[in-house]
Image: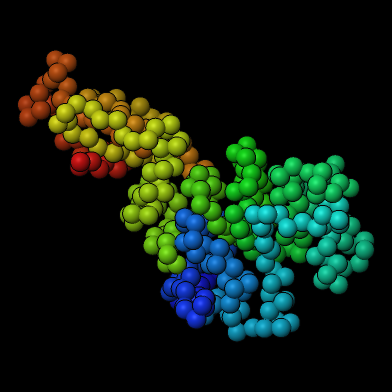
Amino acid sequence: MVQLEQVSKTFQSNKKDIVALSDINLHVQAGEIYGIIGRSGAGKSTLLRTINLLERPTAGKVCIDGVDITSLDGGSLAAQRQRIGMVFQSFNLLNAKTVAQNIEFPLKLAGKYSRAEREARVDELLDLVGLKDQRDKHPAQLSGGQKQRVGIARAIAHHPRLLLCDEATSALDPETTQSILDLLADINSRLGLTIVLITHEMSVIRRLCDRVAVIDRGRIVEQGDVADVFLHPVHPVTQGLVNESLAAEAGIRAVQRGSAGALRARITYRGEAVYQPLISQIEARSGKRLAILQGVVSSMKDTPYAQLTVELCDSSEAGAPAAGDPAAGEPIAEVMHSLGIRYEVIHD
């Protein structure tokens, strides 16, 4: 669907070259929700804007459905852009026009729809985004969430195949953010619309996206399925984003330390395993006692997961066989593997 090949973007400031993007390679599959995350100034907005050539790359190719749009200009490029919708952080609504008129505006600009066709499409979109009773109001009379719903309806008025979202929820409160993410997920499911969004919030990625790319200083430093990247981050930037998200969700700032010298480990499992009594199974088979120091049980899109930091102690302290005793049980790593649990020892 979307293919970026060795895309770079350089700006000039005071006769100096500023590299905003460097050698970006990205592939977004049709029908998926793809997230791009990074801190402020990482280059994510520039990257998103290259996809519809609002920022033309200095080097590289941008292909949409196999068409190299970097080779287009004029009417050919305008025709391709009509197949790409865009939702902005600041809504960008026309304050003098009503909700219905804002949604109708791009249809009027296209010049190929009759009035009856435009009105029918506006009614359809108002119903889709849940704003039928707001059609005659002006933007000043709407809440932030309602304004963003208008922005989304306007962005998909042309039946685009691709929707770009530029920090679409960062100006909204948490409850409203969830409702907008639910709407985007519904649109993706109902219409088969491919969505690419940028954000600095890992919680948005976890809630909505299928795959994710992490950008830092204009480069993609990590990408893959959200579950893999979130649960097993490799790059330090990704690790920092994930740790901040987990700490915020768990309501703590750092892992609490257990007994001096005790072995600590991080265990991760997902899917149906989350609903099983795995801790008791581990203890029974390994002869170890697990004390949970920190943990998150949540979900990524439709996939439940658990990630726990545990302290492992010999159950002999409670009268069970000591470690090393033939009756002590199976090696802990083998037990974890057999149960489908990822097991990582934490070294201080």
Residue 8 position in % (x across, y down):
48, 76
State the count of labels: 0
What color scheme is it? Answer: rainbow
Q: Residue at x 53, y 67 (%)?
A: 47
Would residue 12 be found to the left or right of residue 332 on screen? right
Is residue 174 at least partly visible in the picture?
yes
Q: Residue furthest left?
A: 325
Would residue 15 be found to the left or right of residue 186 on screen? left
Residue 6 position in % (x across, y down):
45, 76
Q: Quadrant of residue 24?
A: bottom left
Is residue 213 at least partly visible in the picture?
no
Q: Residue at x 30, y 38 (%)?
A: 267
In the image, 248 versus 100, the foreground residue is 248
Q: Residue at x 12, y 26 (%)?
A: 328
Q: Residue furthest top?
A: 319
Q: Quadrant of residue 80?
A: bottom right
Work out which quarter of the rendered image holds the C terminus and state it: top left
Is 326 drawn above or below residue 226 in the view shown? above
Is 115 drawn above or below residue 314 in the view shown? below
Residue 163 position in % (x across, y down):
64, 61
Work out which quarter of the rendered image holds the N terminus and state it: bottom right
Q: Residue furthest front?
A: 14
Q: Residue at x 37, y 35 (%)?
A: 253
Residue 158 position in % (x across, y down):
76, 64
